[in-house]
Image: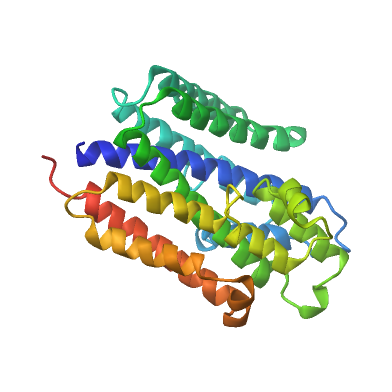
Amino acid sequence: MLSSTADHLYWMSRSMERAENTARMLDVTYRMSLLKHALIEPHHEWRAMLSISGLHEDFEARYDLPSGQNVLHFMALDEKNPGSIYNSIFNARENARAVRGKITSEMWEALNATWLTMHQTRIEGIEEDGVSKFFEWVKERSHLIRGIAHGTMLRDNTFRFIRLGMFLERADNTARILDVKYHILLPSPKDFGGAADYYQWGSVLRSVSAFESYRKVYRDQIAPKRVAELLMLNTDMARSLITCVNEVHRLLREIDGSRANLLLSRCSDLHSRLHGATIENIFSYGLHEYLSEFLEEIYELGKLINTTYFWSKDE
Protein backbone atom coordinates (compact mmCIF):
# COMPACT_ATOMS: atom_id res chain seq x y z
CA MET A 1 0.00 0.00 0.00
CA LEU A 2 1.27 3.50 -0.82
CA SER A 3 2.18 5.52 2.26
CA SER A 4 -0.03 8.42 1.11
CA THR A 5 -3.01 6.07 0.89
CA ALA A 6 -2.40 4.70 4.38
CA ASP A 7 -2.04 8.30 5.63
CA HIS A 8 -5.45 9.33 4.24
CA LEU A 9 -7.19 6.23 5.62
CA TYR A 10 -5.67 6.68 9.07
CA TRP A 11 -6.58 10.37 9.33
CA MET A 12 -10.01 9.86 7.82
CA SER A 13 -10.77 7.52 10.72
CA ARG A 14 -9.08 9.62 13.41
CA SER A 15 -10.96 12.73 12.28
CA MET A 16 -14.37 11.05 12.38
CA GLU A 17 -13.61 9.54 15.79
CA ARG A 18 -12.52 12.98 17.00
CA ALA A 19 -15.79 14.51 15.82
CA GLU A 20 -17.74 11.87 17.74
CA ASN A 21 -15.65 12.25 20.91
CA THR A 22 -16.00 16.04 20.81
CA ALA A 23 -19.77 15.69 20.39
CA ARG A 24 -19.91 13.31 23.35
CA MET A 25 -18.05 15.68 25.65
CA LEU A 26 -19.93 18.77 24.52
CA ASP A 27 -23.28 17.07 24.99
CA VAL A 28 -22.45 15.97 28.53
CA THR A 29 -20.96 19.38 29.35
CA TYR A 30 -24.08 21.11 28.04
CA ARG A 31 -26.32 18.90 30.17
CA MET A 32 -24.12 19.53 33.22
CA SER A 33 -24.33 23.27 32.64
CA LEU A 34 -28.11 23.07 33.05
CA LEU A 35 -27.72 22.01 36.68
CA LYS A 36 -28.13 24.63 39.35
CA HIS A 37 -24.93 26.55 39.89
CA ALA A 38 -25.22 25.72 43.58
CA LEU A 39 -23.80 22.35 42.51
CA ILE A 40 -21.34 23.52 39.89
CA GLU A 41 -19.45 26.79 39.61
CA PRO A 42 -20.50 28.89 36.59
CA HIS A 43 -18.36 28.26 33.47
CA HIS A 44 -16.34 25.60 35.35
CA GLU A 45 -17.58 22.78 33.14
CA TRP A 46 -16.83 24.75 29.96
CA ARG A 47 -13.27 25.46 31.06
CA ALA A 48 -12.87 21.74 31.66
CA MET A 49 -14.09 21.02 28.12
CA LEU A 50 -11.43 23.32 26.69
CA SER A 51 -8.76 21.69 28.85
CA ILE A 52 -9.74 18.21 27.66
CA SER A 53 -9.35 19.30 24.04
CA GLY A 54 -6.09 21.15 24.70
CA LEU A 55 -7.49 24.19 22.88
CA HIS A 56 -7.90 26.62 25.79
CA GLU A 57 -5.13 28.93 24.54
CA ASP A 58 -6.65 29.17 21.05
CA PHE A 59 -10.04 29.86 22.60
CA GLU A 60 -8.74 32.56 24.96
CA ALA A 61 -7.04 34.32 22.05
CA ARG A 62 -10.38 34.85 20.35
CA TYR A 63 -13.08 34.81 23.06
CA ASP A 64 -13.40 36.80 26.27
CA LEU A 65 -15.51 34.42 28.36
CA PRO A 66 -15.76 30.59 28.43
CA SER A 67 -19.56 30.73 28.32
CA GLY A 68 -21.65 27.89 26.98
CA GLN A 69 -22.53 29.77 23.81
CA ASN A 70 -18.91 30.67 23.06
CA VAL A 71 -17.47 27.22 23.75
CA LEU A 72 -20.24 25.45 21.84
CA HIS A 73 -19.63 27.58 18.77
CA PHE A 74 -15.85 27.26 19.05
CA MET A 75 -15.86 23.47 19.50
CA ALA A 76 -18.75 22.63 17.17
CA LEU A 77 -18.97 25.07 14.25
CA ASP A 78 -15.88 27.30 14.21
CA GLU A 79 -14.09 26.81 10.88
CA LYS A 80 -10.98 28.54 12.28
CA ASN A 81 -10.67 25.95 15.07
CA PRO A 82 -8.85 22.89 13.65
CA GLY A 83 -10.32 20.71 16.42
CA SER A 84 -13.96 21.67 15.88
CA ILE A 85 -16.57 19.12 14.86
CA TYR A 86 -16.99 21.05 11.62
CA ASN A 87 -13.32 20.74 10.69
CA SER A 88 -13.06 17.15 11.92
CA ILE A 89 -15.87 16.08 9.59
CA PHE A 90 -14.42 18.17 6.77
CA ASN A 91 -11.02 16.48 7.23
CA ALA A 92 -12.62 13.03 7.34
CA ARG A 93 -14.45 13.71 4.08
CA GLU A 94 -11.40 15.19 2.33
CA ASN A 95 -9.23 12.23 3.29
CA ALA A 96 -11.95 9.86 2.12
CA ARG A 97 -12.20 11.72 -1.19
CA ALA A 98 -8.48 11.18 -1.74
CA VAL A 99 -8.87 7.39 -1.40
CA ARG A 100 -12.31 6.80 -2.90
CA GLY A 101 -10.98 3.80 -4.77
CA LYS A 102 -9.89 2.12 -1.53
CA ILE A 103 -13.11 2.45 0.47
CA THR A 104 -16.54 1.13 -0.48
CA SER A 105 -19.07 3.31 -2.28
CA GLU A 106 -21.41 3.03 0.71
CA MET A 107 -18.75 4.42 3.02
CA TRP A 108 -17.92 7.31 0.71
CA GLU A 109 -21.58 8.22 0.27
CA ALA A 110 -22.13 8.22 4.05
CA LEU A 111 -19.09 10.43 4.68
CA ASN A 112 -19.97 12.81 1.87
CA ALA A 113 -23.58 13.13 3.02
CA THR A 114 -22.38 13.77 6.58
CA TRP A 115 -20.15 16.59 5.39
CA LEU A 116 -22.87 18.19 3.27
CA THR A 117 -25.26 18.23 6.24
CA MET A 118 -22.51 19.54 8.53
CA HIS A 119 -21.70 22.35 6.11
CA GLN A 120 -25.36 23.37 5.96
CA THR A 121 -25.61 23.23 9.76
CA ARG A 122 -22.71 25.66 10.13
CA ILE A 123 -24.43 28.09 7.76
CA GLU A 124 -27.81 27.87 9.48
CA GLY A 125 -26.49 27.50 13.04
CA ILE A 126 -27.76 25.25 15.82
CA GLU A 127 -31.05 26.20 17.40
CA GLU A 128 -30.96 26.67 21.16
CA ASP A 129 -33.33 23.76 21.76
CA GLY A 130 -31.53 21.56 19.22
CA VAL A 131 -28.07 21.35 20.80
CA SER A 132 -28.35 17.79 22.10
CA LYS A 133 -30.12 16.72 18.91
CA PHE A 134 -27.13 17.93 16.90
CA PHE A 135 -24.68 15.99 19.07
CA GLU A 136 -26.79 12.86 18.74
CA TRP A 137 -26.68 13.30 14.99
CA VAL A 138 -22.86 13.49 15.01
CA LYS A 139 -22.61 10.32 17.13
CA GLU A 140 -25.11 8.48 14.93
CA ARG A 141 -23.24 9.43 11.74
CA SER A 142 -19.97 8.22 13.26
CA HIS A 143 -21.61 4.95 14.29
CA LEU A 144 -23.08 4.57 10.80
CA ILE A 145 -19.77 5.16 9.02
CA ARG A 146 -17.90 2.83 11.37
CA GLY A 147 -20.60 0.18 10.91
CA ILE A 148 -20.46 0.50 7.12
CA ALA A 149 -16.69 0.03 7.20
CA HIS A 150 -17.03 -3.02 9.41
CA GLY A 151 -19.80 -4.52 7.30
CA THR A 152 -18.55 -3.86 3.77
CA MET A 153 -14.75 -3.77 3.68
CA LEU A 154 -12.16 -6.47 3.16
CA ARG A 155 -10.07 -7.27 6.24
CA ASP A 156 -6.88 -6.05 4.57
CA ASN A 157 -4.48 -3.22 5.40
CA THR A 158 -7.01 -0.65 4.23
CA PHE A 159 -9.37 -1.76 6.96
CA ARG A 160 -6.52 -2.06 9.48
CA PHE A 161 -5.34 1.52 9.01
CA ILE A 162 -8.91 2.75 9.44
CA ARG A 163 -9.21 0.82 12.72
CA LEU A 164 -5.76 1.94 13.84
CA GLY A 165 -6.67 5.62 13.57
CA MET A 166 -9.93 5.06 15.42
CA PHE A 167 -8.45 3.24 18.42
CA LEU A 168 -5.48 5.60 18.82
CA GLU A 169 -7.79 8.63 18.85
CA ARG A 170 -10.18 6.89 21.25
CA ALA A 171 -7.39 6.01 23.71
CA ASP A 172 -6.21 9.62 23.74
CA ASN A 173 -9.72 10.92 24.38
CA THR A 174 -10.52 8.54 27.25
CA ALA A 175 -7.25 9.37 29.01
CA ARG A 176 -7.86 13.11 28.66
CA ILE A 177 -11.36 12.87 30.10
CA LEU A 178 -10.12 11.00 33.18
CA ASP A 179 -7.16 13.30 33.73
CA VAL A 180 -9.20 16.49 33.50
CA LYS A 181 -11.82 15.06 35.87
CA TYR A 182 -9.30 14.80 38.66
CA HIS A 183 -7.49 18.07 38.09
CA ILE A 184 -10.09 20.49 36.74
CA LEU A 185 -13.54 19.39 37.83
CA LEU A 186 -12.57 18.64 41.44
CA PRO A 187 -10.02 21.24 42.54
CA SER A 188 -10.81 20.85 46.23
CA PRO A 189 -10.93 17.71 48.43
CA LYS A 190 -14.15 18.96 50.01
CA ASP A 191 -15.96 18.26 46.74
CA PHE A 192 -15.44 14.50 46.96
CA GLY A 193 -18.60 12.59 47.77
CA GLY A 194 -20.93 15.54 47.27
CA ALA A 195 -23.78 16.01 44.83
CA ALA A 196 -21.53 17.70 42.28
CA ASP A 197 -19.07 14.82 42.56
CA TYR A 198 -21.80 12.24 41.82
CA TYR A 199 -23.13 14.12 38.79
CA GLN A 200 -19.66 14.81 37.43
CA TRP A 201 -18.58 11.19 37.63
CA GLY A 202 -21.88 10.18 36.08
CA SER A 203 -21.17 12.63 33.26
CA VAL A 204 -17.74 11.07 32.71
CA LEU A 205 -19.33 7.64 32.34
CA ARG A 206 -22.04 8.93 30.00
CA SER A 207 -19.47 10.74 27.85
CA VAL A 208 -18.00 7.35 26.88
CA SER A 209 -21.33 5.43 26.92
CA ALA A 210 -20.26 3.54 30.03
CA PHE A 211 -22.96 4.42 32.58
CA GLU A 212 -24.96 1.22 32.07
CA SER A 213 -21.78 -0.84 31.85
CA TYR A 214 -20.64 0.54 35.20
CA ARG A 215 -23.93 -0.47 36.84
CA LYS A 216 -23.68 -3.92 35.34
CA VAL A 217 -20.08 -4.50 36.47
CA TYR A 218 -20.16 -2.94 39.96
CA ARG A 219 -23.86 -2.82 40.93
CA ASP A 220 -23.10 -0.03 43.39
CA GLN A 221 -22.98 3.74 43.70
CA ILE A 222 -20.50 5.59 41.53
CA ALA A 223 -17.01 5.63 43.06
CA PRO A 224 -14.06 7.45 41.44
CA LYS A 225 -11.60 4.56 41.73
CA ARG A 226 -14.05 2.13 40.14
CA VAL A 227 -14.78 4.55 37.30
CA ALA A 228 -11.06 4.82 36.65
CA GLU A 229 -10.66 1.05 36.77
CA LEU A 230 -13.50 0.53 34.28
CA LEU A 231 -12.20 3.11 31.83
CA MET A 232 -8.56 2.11 32.13
CA LEU A 233 -8.20 -1.61 32.83
CA ASN A 234 -11.45 -3.39 31.94
CA THR A 235 -10.85 -5.41 28.76
CA ASP A 236 -14.62 -5.79 28.20
CA MET A 237 -15.15 -2.03 28.07
CA ALA A 238 -15.19 -0.82 24.44
CA ARG A 239 -13.54 2.54 25.15
CA SER A 240 -11.15 1.61 27.95
CA LEU A 241 -7.45 2.35 27.61
CA ILE A 242 -6.52 -1.31 27.72
CA THR A 243 -9.04 -2.27 25.02
CA CYS A 244 -7.77 0.49 22.73
CA VAL A 245 -4.13 -0.45 23.27
CA ASN A 246 -4.94 -4.14 22.76
CA GLU A 247 -6.42 -3.28 19.37
CA VAL A 248 -3.58 -0.94 18.39
CA HIS A 249 -1.05 -3.63 19.35
CA ARG A 250 -2.89 -6.31 17.35
CA LEU A 251 -3.33 -4.09 14.29
CA LEU A 252 0.32 -3.05 14.21
CA ARG A 253 1.42 -6.66 14.35
CA GLU A 254 -0.91 -7.50 11.47
CA ILE A 255 0.22 -4.53 9.36
CA ASP A 256 3.91 -4.99 10.26
CA GLY A 257 6.37 -3.82 7.62
CA SER A 258 10.15 -3.80 7.24
CA ARG A 259 10.56 -0.52 9.17
CA ALA A 260 8.13 -1.25 12.01
CA ASN A 261 10.47 -2.78 14.62
CA LEU A 262 10.79 0.36 16.77
CA LEU A 263 7.05 1.07 16.55
CA LEU A 264 6.12 -2.49 17.51
CA SER A 265 8.59 -2.48 20.38
CA ARG A 266 7.23 0.81 21.75
CA CYS A 267 3.64 -0.39 21.48
CA SER A 268 4.50 -3.73 23.11
CA ASP A 269 6.02 -1.90 26.09
CA LEU A 270 2.85 0.13 26.61
CA HIS A 271 0.72 -2.98 26.12
CA SER A 272 2.71 -4.90 28.77
CA ARG A 273 2.59 -2.06 31.30
CA LEU A 274 -1.18 -1.78 31.05
CA HIS A 275 -1.68 -5.53 31.42
CA GLY A 276 0.60 -5.58 34.47
CA ALA A 277 -1.11 -2.63 36.18
CA THR A 278 -3.69 -2.63 38.95
CA ILE A 279 -5.86 0.31 39.90
CA GLU A 280 -4.28 0.33 43.38
CA ASN A 281 -0.80 0.64 41.90
CA ILE A 282 -1.94 3.37 39.53
CA PHE A 283 -3.46 5.44 42.34
CA SER A 284 -0.38 4.89 44.52
CA TYR A 285 1.81 6.14 41.68
CA GLY A 286 -0.56 9.02 40.97
CA LEU A 287 -3.43 8.96 38.51
CA HIS A 288 -2.44 12.26 36.91
CA GLU A 289 1.16 11.15 36.53
CA TYR A 290 0.12 7.80 35.05
CA LEU A 291 -2.33 9.34 32.58
CA SER A 292 0.17 12.05 31.59
CA GLU A 293 2.73 9.39 30.77
CA PHE A 294 0.09 7.39 28.90
CA LEU A 295 -0.83 10.42 26.78
CA GLU A 296 2.84 11.01 26.02
CA GLU A 297 3.15 7.39 24.92
CA ILE A 298 0.09 7.69 22.67
CA TYR A 299 1.54 10.87 21.18
CA GLU A 300 4.87 9.15 20.53
CA LEU A 301 3.09 6.16 18.98
CA GLY A 302 1.27 8.55 16.66
CA LYS A 303 4.57 10.13 15.64
CA LEU A 304 6.15 6.73 15.04
CA ILE A 305 3.16 5.62 12.96
CA ASN A 306 3.66 8.73 10.83
CA THR A 307 7.39 8.20 10.34
CA THR A 308 7.07 4.44 9.86
CA TYR A 309 4.19 4.28 7.40
CA PHE A 310 3.41 7.74 6.03
CA TRP A 311 6.59 9.76 5.63
CA SER A 312 8.56 7.15 3.74
CA LYS A 313 8.96 7.31 -0.02
CA ASP A 314 6.15 5.58 -1.87
CA GLU A 315 7.28 2.49 -3.69
Where residue 77 appears, as percent x and y from the top left, is 56, 39
Where residue 122 appears, as percent x and y from the top left, is 56, 32
Q: Dividing the picture into quarters, in which one does residue 157 lie?
A: top left
Task: Count the numbered circles shown.
Answer: 0
The single residue placed furthest to the front in the displayed view is 276
The single residue placed furthest to the bottom in the displayed view is 284
- Above/below status of 69 relative to 176: above
Where residue 64 appears, as percent x and y from the top left, is 62, 59
Left or right, residue 220 beside residue 231: right
- Residue 63 or 296: which is nearer the viewer? 296
Looking at the rendered image, the quarter that the N terminus falls into is top left
- Above/below status of 225 relative to 5: below
Residue 77 in view, yes or no: yes
Left or right, residue 78 beside residue 152: right
Name the residue at 30% across, 58% down: 264
Looking at the rendered image, the quarter that the C terminus falls into is top left
Name the residue at 21% across, 42% down: 3
Name the residue at 52% across, 61% down: 54
Left or right, residue 233 beside residue 273: right
- Residue 137 or 257: which is nearer the viewer? 257
What colour-coding does the image apply?
Answer: rainbow
Name the residue at 53% across, 58% down: 241
- Above/below status of 300 relative to 130: below
- Residue 157 or 194: which is nearer the viewer? 157
Residue 62 in view, yes or no: no
Where residue 11 appears, as percent x and y from the top left, is 37, 42
